[in-house]
Image: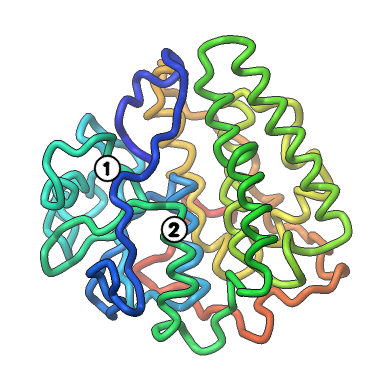
Amino acid sequence: MGGDGNRAYGHKTFSRSRSHFRDRITADGSDGWPVAAGRYRLVVSRACPWASRAVISRRLLGLEDALSMAVADPIQDDRSWRFTLDPDGRDPVLGIRYLSEAYDRRETGYPGGVSVPAVVDVPSGRLVTNDYQQLTLDLATEWTALHRAGAPDLYPADRRDEIDAVMAEVYRDVNNGVYRAGFATHQQEYEEACEGVFRRLELLAERLSGQRYLVGDTLTEADIRLFTTLVRFDPVYHGHFKCNRWKLAEDPVLWAYARDLFQTPGFGDTVDFDHIKRHYYQVHTGINPTGIVPLGPDLAGWLSPHHREQLGGRPFGDGTPPGPVPPGERVASLGRAA
């Protein structure tokens, strides 16, 4: 998610740009960036669904010690993501005030905006990648030497074709669909996007009515990618993006599925509802010019029983849940469901 042109949203047709910096950090270092503990820093916003994928993956895989994380302020200014949550407004590891400084060290005059998630090479201060689609797949498959004991296989080789197919549909109609609806500038454009969102959600509900997870009987990358949209649905997409055919909490299957994931270590403990709501309602002035942040919805329901365990499934496969959230990465009480 970038900070470029936030005021224009709602005034021009929305189109998600491809990641410009698509280098990969791999076990063999074929792109010039070998996997190495402590070398890289993951820059995220807890408001951003694309960045939140990486936050969840990193935690599930136990990469907290190997890959440090910087959390940007959910409210951007005209230079985009900034480190105003840190003392003196600087990231303590990279020493910069704005993520754009790491972009500039990589390439001046690059096309597109400054987006998260981003991985920065700590020694040089240069951006390595902002490829949100590939980043989490590489965390699951290229960083295995640094995974914790008991880390789940989030992208199992024998299921990848099915996972890829499900993720492609989820991306087109749900992850990106809510944005196309929310930033539509014409009625027909909005209606087509909104109808696509709910048509896909209904199909996903059918799929999940008889199985606990999207692919197989364990958590995979596909579940992570759907979750980051579902957890934002009622707080922002239903109202702010006008995806209001029904609320997530009104669909018994998807609401139970989302609660199941939320209550799984590594998912809900990374979610900051305060950052999410303030970012969308205060930054997107093109569609919410007052900047008023709504009080609701009530978040207590996220912790209610979901009963999805009756469908069986093994969340972590042959692995184990991640341990407690590191003290410095705990979500503030204001952003939690309870």
Q: Position of residue 87 (x, y in %)?
A: 17, 56
Q: Residue at x 22, y 49 (%)?
A: 83
Colouring chosen for the image of the structure: rainbow
Above or below, 132 against 176 in this view is below
Does dot 2 land on a helix, a strand or a loop?
A: helix
Task: Name the residue carrying label 1.
Answer: 81
Q: Residue at x 62, y 74 (%)?
A: 156
**Label 2 Cα crowd, 10 Å radius (few <14 / some 14-19 / many 20+):** some
Task: Name the residue carrying label 2.
Answer: 134
Q: Quadrant of the N terminus?
A: top left
Q: Position of residue 266 (x, y in %)?
A: 55, 68
Whole-number angstrom distance, CA of label 1 to CA of label 2: 21 Å
**Label 1 Cα crowd, 10 Å radius (few <14 / some 14-19 / many 20+):** many
Asked if residue 233 shows in the view, the reply is: no
Does dot 1 land on a helix, a strand or a loop?
A: loop
Q: Position of residue 179 (x, y in %)?
A: 53, 31
Q: Residue at x 23, y 60 (%)?
A: 120
Q: Residue at x 58, y 70 (%)?
A: 155
Q: What's under tag 2, amino acid-wise?
A: Gln
Q: Residue 237's quadrant in the figure?
A: top right
Q: Residue furthest front?
A: 30
Q: Quadrant of the C terminus?
A: bottom right
Q: What's under tag 1, amino acid-wise?
A: Trp
Q: Return the residue nearer the eye: 202 or 160.
A: 160
The mark total stands at: 2
